[in-house]
Image (spheres, rainbow, N blue to C red):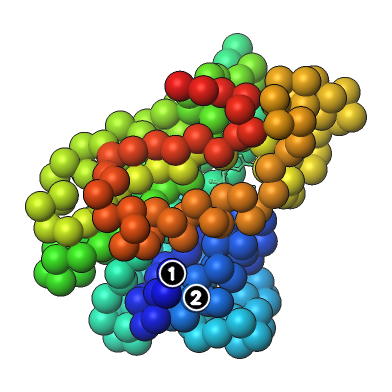
Amino acid sequence: MSFKNKIVLVTGARKGIGYAITKIFLIKGAIVIGTSTDILRVEKINNYIKKYGKGKGMKLDISNVDSIDNFFKKIQRNFGKVDILINNAGILCDNLLINMKEKEWQSVINVNLTSIFRISKRVIRYMIKQCYGRIITIGSVIGSIGNIGQTNYSAAKAGLIGFSKSLAKEVAHKGITVNVIAPGFIITNMTKSLSNKQRAKILSKIPIKRFGNIKDIANIVAFFASEKASYITGETIHVNGGMYMP
Ligand SMILES: NC(=O)c1ccc[n+]([C@@H]2O[C@H](COP(=O)([O-])OP(=O)(O)OC[C@H]3O[C@@H](n4cnc5c(N)ncnc54)[C@H](OP(=O)(O)O)[C@@H]3O)[C@@H](O)[C@H]2O)c1
């Protein structure tokens, strides 16, 4: 599987799942644009990009339209296109619905769902023009099974499945596929804060009896981006050790 000279955009590339996705594309020959909201973290992305391949770390806040517009002006100047988009960046802001503040709802919907619309809309123009493209969005098992304290997160993650199915139908005839990967519990910063009790409870529901690791997700992303997956679109693949089987 080679992505030689393909331009790949990965949002939230500094750590966790985004880091593993960026690394796998670098190793397989792609030119990767990895983003962070923080300029110091952009430098860290640049350091590992240099180590593994070719590309550029760039600043991007996907919750901010001006930041997205500036970012895509630079993409146009420096790269002229995006072949493969990985919508990875995401946040949590948990609260029971009864206590959830408007800001907690809006921020999670904005970062985890509205940004997918904004960024996909900007890259789809390049993809339609060249009759080729891959859009892969990182969802979550929570979008399918729900979770206490995560009405905002599960609404956003469920929403991006519907978004991807509709977009898949709009652009399939242009050689563009649009898919979702829905991880279960993966060992990253996002899951580090779980208590031992919470971990044990989650593990009891995972038939494979371990949390996922970031490579488990990156490998499937690379598959969806490859020619081998060119007949799969509008699909959601669950990578969760068997904790949820649709
Ligand atoms: N870990 C899990 O168990 C799990 C399970 C299911 C789904 N997921 C999903 O997988 C994706 C990656 O999660 P992770 O666990 O790797 O999380 P993580 O380690 O917390 O990383 C999240 C990334 O999102 C970026 N980000 C946050 N807000 C942003 C914004 N406004 N604009 C641009 N980038 C922003 C962060 O970038 P900077 O901080 O550098 O700006 C960071 O790189 C998310 O969509 C998450 O919902 C994770």
Residue drawn at the location 37% of the way across and 62% of the way down: 226
Q: Secondary structure at mark 2?
A: loop
| Mark closer to the observer (1, 2) | 1
Does the rendering let one see residue 230?
yes
Task: Please give the residue where the numbered disc 1 appears in the rendered image.
Answer: 1
x then y, percent, for residue 157: 46, 33
Q: Residues within 10 Å of mark 2 (few under 14, many from 20)?
A: some
Residue 39 higher or lower than 137, as above or below? below
On-image quarter of the N terminus: bottom left
Res 122 → quadrant: bottom left
* Direction from residue 72 to residue 207 in the image, left or right: right
Nearest to N terminus: mark 1 or mark 2: 1
Residue 74: mark in rendering: none
Disc 2 marks which residue? Answer: 28
Q: In the figure, 60 relative to 215: above or below?
A: below
Q: Is residue 120 visible?
A: no
Locate residue 77 relative to residue 186 in the image: left or right. Answer: left
What SS does tag 1 mark? loop
Question: Which quarter of the figure is the C terminus placed in?
Answer: top left
Q: Are marks 1 and 2 in contact (CB under 8 Å)?
A: yes
In the rendered view, would you say 162 is above or below 44? above
Instruction: Name which residue type carries label 1.
Output: Met
**Location of residue 104 in the rendering, given as x and y in whole percent from the top left corner:** 56, 32
Point 54% across, 30% down: residue = 141
In the figure, residue 237 lies in which quadrant?
top left
Q: Would you say the beta carbon of the disc 1 residue lies within 8 angstroms of ligand 1?
A: no
Point 62% across, 64% down: residue = 19
Amino acid bearing label 2: Lys
Q: Position of residue 221 (x, y in %)?
A: 47, 55
In the rendered image, residue 117, in percent from the top left (x then y), is placed at 31, 47
Question: In the rendered view, would you say 234 is above or below 82?
Answer: above
Q: Residues within 10 Å of mark 1 (few under 14, many from 20)?
A: few
